[in-house]
Image (cartoon, rainbow, N blue to C red):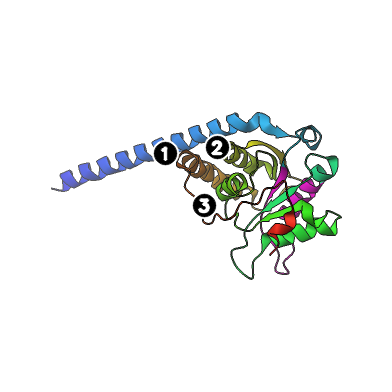
Amino acid sequence: MKRNWKKIIICVVIIGACIAVLGGLTCLGVNIYVRNTVSERILSVEEAADIDADCILVLGSGIKLDGTPGKVLTDRLDKGLALYEIGASPKLLMSGDHGRVNYDEVNAMKNYAMERGVASEDVFMDHAGFSTYESMYRAAAIFEVEKTVIVTQKYHLYRSIYNALSMGIDAYGVASDLESYRGSFSREIRECLAIVKDFVYCIFQPKPTYLGDVIPVSGNGDLTNG
């Protein structure tokens, strides 16, 4: 009887190891595919100036307790503003989390841009950009974005561009890595798993948490104030 239990345990361990290896190879394969698919769409600020995009899509990140952008988000905003100033697009779309009364990424982002001279009507806010996938889905469905330059840190650009392409958006990206960030390694690990998750989402395209009325990004950004 003990011998049989040993055989069962060994079989379970072997099967578990095989599943883990298969899962790891699948994750690696999807990551390689996604990164190779979009790598040539990552541009410099100067290259992006000739894209003639509908908007510059800046993705949200953490804000401070005082409601102002954190370091990662500040770097995204500064790179987005550089693109705006060089003429990559006349519109900015700030997409982030405003799912709670006391947590508002998008107004922090718009205020930051306006304090640096951007006209309010040029800045749109997507208050329900709760994830990268939802930001891209809503960019296409709500804001009718057809061509965009996405701004985020480079590790995050591959998934962002891939998601946008899957939604029918002609997307390019500019990396906002202005320095090394604390916790970069753990972010890279999480991103590998997130790429697999969004790869599946892009196949089935589930609806985001919220949709709503169409607000073309070609119009007045003040329609998104709130």
Residue 53 image point, x, y percent: 73, 38
Q: Is residue 125 above or below residue 39?
A: below
User: How many angstroms separate mark 3 from mark 2 (CA)?
Assistant: 14 Å
The residue segment tinted magenta is 55-81
Other-residue count near label 2 (Cα within 10 Å), few / some / many at <14 / 14–19 / ≥20: some
Q: Residue at x 64, y 66 (%)?
A: 103
**Earlier residue among tags 2 and 1:** 1
Most extreme residue toward the right, as rendered?
Answer: 117
Q: Residue at x 60, y 67 (%)?
A: 100
- Taking 11 as reference, is 63 left or right? right
Pick the front one: 184 or 9:
184
User: How many angstroms separate mark 3 from mark 1 (CA)?
Assistant: 27 Å
Which residue in the structure is indicated by mark 2?
166
Query: In terms of secondary structure, where does tag 3 sit?
Result: loop
Other-residue count near label 1 (Cα within 10 Å), few / some / many at <14 / 14–19 / ≥20: few
Query: In terms of secondary structure, where does tag 2 sit?
Result: helix
| Residue 70 shows up from this direction | no
Q: Which residue type does callout 3 highlight?
A: Pro
Residue 32 image point, x, y percent: 54, 32
In magenta segment, residue 9: no
Which residue in the structure is indicated by mark 1?
23
Q: Is label 2 or label 1 in front?
A: 2
Pick the front one: 100 or 69:
100
Residue 124 image point, x, y percent: 71, 53
Which residue in the structure is indicated by mark 3?
208
